[in-house]
Image (cartoon, grey):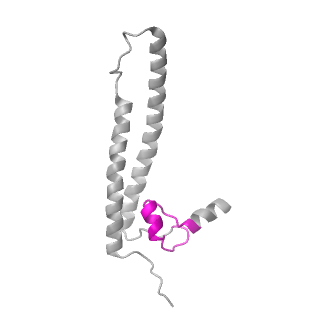
């Protein structure tokens, strides 16, 4: 009978930590880019164009800023989830499904390193 592990070992946790840190770095860069869009003043002024074009351009600027704001919010949440995953690594609770208490498969953690649920738990959530 195979002895089932109840947590990932330190070497495995270190591998996940490196993966999460890379994703965090990318996510923070993307967030900075989105924040730059949000903070950008109207440096592409429309003072010298006709009022019709000015209204159209202002409308598209507003839409782009709204989209950037929504994406920035999602990115911030993703960063928080990744940071929480790092805390779980430090506590050696990373990779343990919060619903079933079983280890989340390595493949799932590599694909979604901030997850706290196994696919089994996730699918059950949608059936209930």
Report whether residue 97 is seen. yes
Residue 93 horizontal/vertical position (percent) = 41, 70
- Magenta-colored span: 98-120
101 in magenta: yes
Report whether residue 90 is seen. no
- Foreground pick, 105 / 88: 105
Above-or-below relation of 81 to 101: above
Image quadrant assignment for residue 69: top left
Q: Is residue 111 left or right of residue 91?
A: right
Residue 19 horizontal/vertical position (percent) = 35, 61
Q: Is residue 72 left or right of residue 119?
A: left
- Foreground pick, 97 / 44: 44
Above-or-below relation of 57 to 125: above
What's the residue at 46%, 9% (across, down)?
51
Outermost residue toward the right?
128
Image quadrant assignment for residue 81: bottom left
What's the residue at 49%, 21% (across, down)?
59
Outermost residue toward the bottom?
1
Report the quarter where the C terminus lies.
Answer: bottom right
67 in magenta: no
What's the residue at 48%, 83% (across, down)?
4
Principal secondary structure, stretch drawn in magenta: loop
Q: Is residue 5 left or right of residue 13?
A: right
Q: How many numbered tags mark residues here?
A: 0
Residue 9 horizontal/vertical position (percent) = 36, 76
Image quadrant assignment for residue 91: bottom left
What's the residue at 31%, 62% (across, down)?
18
């Amino acid at each position: 009978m195979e002895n089932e592990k109840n947590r990932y070992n330190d070497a495995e946790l270190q591998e996940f930590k490196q993966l999460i840190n890379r994703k965090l770095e990318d996510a923070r860069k993307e967030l900075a880019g989105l924040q730059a869009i949000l903070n950008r003043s109207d440096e592409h002024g429309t003072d010298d164009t006709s009022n019709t074009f000015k209204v159209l351009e202002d409308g598209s600027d507003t839409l782009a800023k709204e989209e950037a704001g929504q994406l920035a919010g999602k990115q911030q949440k993703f960063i928080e989830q990744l940071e929480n995953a790092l805390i779980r690594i430090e506590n050696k609770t990373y990779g343990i499904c919060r619903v079933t208490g079983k280890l989340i498969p390595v493949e799932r953690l590599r694909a979604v390193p901030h997850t706290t649920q196994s696919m089994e738990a996730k699918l059950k959530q949608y059936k209930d």
